[in-house]
Image: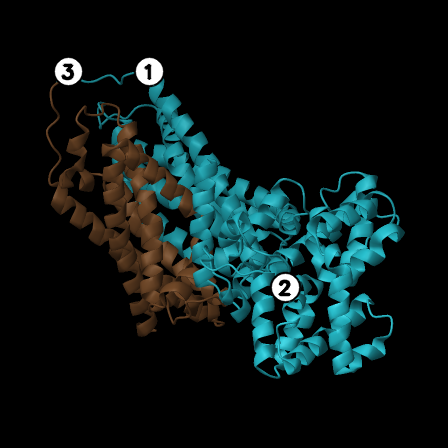
Amino acid sequence: MLPLLVIGSILTFALLAVGLPTSPEQRAVPLFFNPDPRGIRHHAAEALDALRAGEDPRAAEQLARLGGAALPHVLPQLEHLANDAQRRVARALAPVARRTGVARDEAVLDDPDASVRFWKRFWQDRSLDFQPTVVSRLVRRVAARSEALGSADLLQLDTYALPELVRQLGSIRHQNDVTRARRLLHIAGDITERRWLVADDASPEEARRAVTECRRWWDEHRALYTDVIGMSRLTATLTQTRYGRWALRTLREVTGLDTSFVGQDLARRARVTGPLLLCCMIGAWLLAAAGAALLAAAPRRGGLLLRGASALAIAALIPAAVLWPPRLGLEGAMAAACALSVLLGALPALHLGRGALAELLVAGGDKGSPPPLGTLLRRALAAAPVWAPLAFAEAITLVFALEWSSGLGGVGPRTVLALQRGDVAWLMAVCLTLGVATAVVQIVADAALARSLRRPAKAPEVSPC
Amino acid sequence: MLNALLATLGATVLAVVCALLVGVALGGLALGFLEGSRLSARLVELRGALPTLIAAPLLDGWLHLPAPVTLGLLVGAHQGFAVSRWVRGLRLLEPTPGPDHARALRPRRWLGLSPPVRTTIALCAVHVVTLEALLSALQLPPFTVSLGSLMAQALAPAARFGAVVALCCLFVLLDQGAERWARSWVGPPAEASPP
């Protein structure tokens, strides 16, 4: 089941990615495989090269944005640059120094030569702090004890501390986790200039939401602040893709690490869509069986009845689905779903009744004197499993339309909105849920079919002549 | 109105042809081989995972084909997957299934299963028009002038009524044509073999 789900998710994601409107930023990220994943080393080198060549406001802005994470890749190179380039780089890094408060006298940052000297001295003094083990120890200390013990040090490390800060957010289940999340998110928020606040009296659920938002932001920006070398480069070929990001996010949501906003919304809306689907399916199933049995009992009049009823069903189906009067309420919509189910079941029922199934049901019997209606009904019900998974897909479209036209807050209207806005996360959730639901219906239907086939059927009496 | 009718008719005919081709081929695989049966089951799941309402805008954004072609292909594939299950299911339900499954691959045998064929035609017609109307009402692509879109947009009751009547006539014509076609292939009913 799991491999099928993965394959299904890949196919669906591909279709959604190529079929939905996407922004240029989204298109810049590869879909499934990134042959050249980039990390902080690459981004810093790019900015440095641009500044080495001359004035480049975009490169300067990029360097300031990369912040502390870029320092281990930029400052060791400072010595090897020409004087002008050194000044340009120092000027580009000035916002980082101001943000982190590492310069006691900020006037130094306005003087190009003094600024270059400052950064050289800074790297001589502080290069040992820019080590993963140091950051890890600092973050652990802040998480376990008090924010006052190491937050200033972490703020001075700036974006270099972000990977460890996000990693140690962990899962939020108890009040201790809430306290840890509050401390770490406060520092991460200060570094990134974003607000991921956890109130003092926040519940684990509220804290988990804030942590989820932080991790989602990190999913989008991880490549800017982390290095991709060795094994991490290998994994980045898959994770630095649109599908990889979605898969990671979904995995965290499924395992309960993150709050699933889409899942919660889907569950809430499914309380409206579920009963409607159920009404539609049960009604259509019963009608299909009854119609098949009734028409099998009177096959000769079936032709006229078939065409008339089919035409009526078609005539009623479209207005019922599309032009249904609005503001029905859930009860009204359920009644409407039952009515739709009649239409949904009418066509297959009529065709089943007239055609080969009727012959199969009475096979071996005398066509002139068909078996009792009860027998036909039982046998027609046995045929319903063939049809059930197929009707499910038809019912989904009808129920979505019904929800939309009657103003119900079900899955349908939200799905239409997602199609218009290109909301891949919602559409993936809906498609996978529907796929799994169809698979369950099909498995149950096949089991019912197999059981009915294993059961020794009472052979109809066959006329010897 | 004529253009709309032609667009819908074209989409329906394409859907029917596509559905029968896909359905018969998949049904044959499903009956003949275990892998075919599994493939048919997976495609039915795919059919459920991507209802036509979701798949139509995606396919339009991907293929950029004329709207009737997109709708015809989509509905055809959808109903084709259904036909494969019909064919497999009805054969399984047959009280005295023949031991030789290869026989089931003969054309006469397939067309003898006329209820799936005819149900497919009826469902294709209904599905195409419903989808056209839904997409038009929900303002989702592919945008086209068709019977369904006229029904969804028509404000005058007379226009709606006219479109519905046109659709019913279309269905009856298709249904009757399919029956004659199926009968011409199947021929007169075979004599019952002695028990």
Q: Nearer the viewer, mark 1 or mark 2?
A: 2
Q: Secondary structure at mark 3?
A: loop
The amino acid type, in three-letter code, at marker 1 is: Pro
Q: Secondary structure at mark 2?
A: helix
Q: Are marks 2 and 3 in contact (CB under 8 Å)?
A: no
Tell me the number on the disc at residue A464.
3
Q: Tell me what hue chain B is rendered in.
A: brown
Question: Which is nearer the eye, B171 or A274?
Answer: A274
Q: What residue is at 89 percent from the left and 52 percent from the top?
A: A148
Chain with colour cyan in the figure: A
Q: Return the chain for callout 1.
A: A
Q: State the CA–CA distance, disc 2 to disc 3.
A: 94 Å
Mark 1, residue position: A456
Mark 2, residue position: A73
Q: Relative to A253, is A458 on the left or the right?
A: left
The amino acid type, in three-letter code, at marker 2 is: His
Q: State the CA–CA distance, disc 1 to disc 2.
A: 77 Å
**Residue A27 x/y as whole percent:** 49, 66
The first of marks 2 and 3 along the sequence is 2
The amino acid type, in three-letter code, at marker 3 is: Pro
* Residue A260 visible in image: yes
Q: What residue is at 46 percent from the left and 55 percent from the top?
A: A32
Mark 1 vs mark 3: tell me if same chain. Answer: yes
**Residue A161 x/y as whole percent:** 72, 55
Q: Classify 10 Å Cα crowding around label 1: few (below 14), some (14-19), many (20 and above).
A: few
